Amino acid sequence: MCASTDEVVTSMKREEVMHLFGQANSLHALEPLLAAQEAFRQAQSARATKPRARDEVDAQRIAKAYWTGHTGRAERGRVKELAREYGVTEGTVRNYAKKYTPDKIA
């Protein structure tokens, strides 16, 4: 009976070790995902701490730059260039251009 008890204990230990190896493999597979998640969190944090509000003077300056180079057609390249230059989105450039038309800019 001693031999069978030893076999059962050995078998249980083997199953426990295999289970632990399985868990370790699962965690190892998750490592790249966790690293990517952490990088994304840090990027979002950096983006959130960046000052985003523009005052009216900045908004008018962006609109003036838009209307100065405007030819009457939709110019996505120009909007993209201004957005990059001023650190805003293309939508923000368009919104400022709509809000501050040439007749409203002093």
Image (cartoon, rainbow, N blue to C red):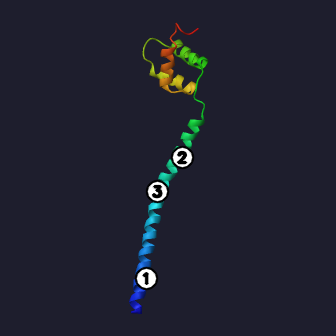
Q: Is residue 54 above or below residue 67?
A: below
Expressed as whole percent of the image width and height from the top left, the position of residue 44 reads: 54, 40
**On-image quarter of the N terminus:** bottom left
Q: Is mark 3 on a helix, strand or loop?
A: helix
Label 2 neighbour load within 10 Å: few <14, some 14-19, many 20+: few
Picture quadrant of residue 73: top left
Q: What residue type is labelled 3?
A: Leu
- Does 6 appear above or below 39? below
Closer to the chain start, of discs 2 and 3, is 3
Residue beneath the point at 48% across and 25% down = 90
> Compared with residue 16, is residue 47 higher up or lower down, i.e. above or below?
above
Q: Residue type at mark 1: give it.
A: Thr
Quadrant for the C terminus in the image: top right
| Amino acid carrying mark 2 in the image | Ala
Q: Is mark 1 on a helix, strand or loop?
A: helix
Residue 78 is at least partly visible in this image: no
From the viewer's side, name the closer residue of 5 and 67.
Answer: 5
Residue 15: name its quadrant. bottom left
Q: Give me the disc on residue 10.
A: 1
Q: Name the residue under label 2.
A: 39
Q: Position of residue 64 (x, y in %)?
A: 55, 14
Query: Mark 3 highlights which residue?
Result: 30
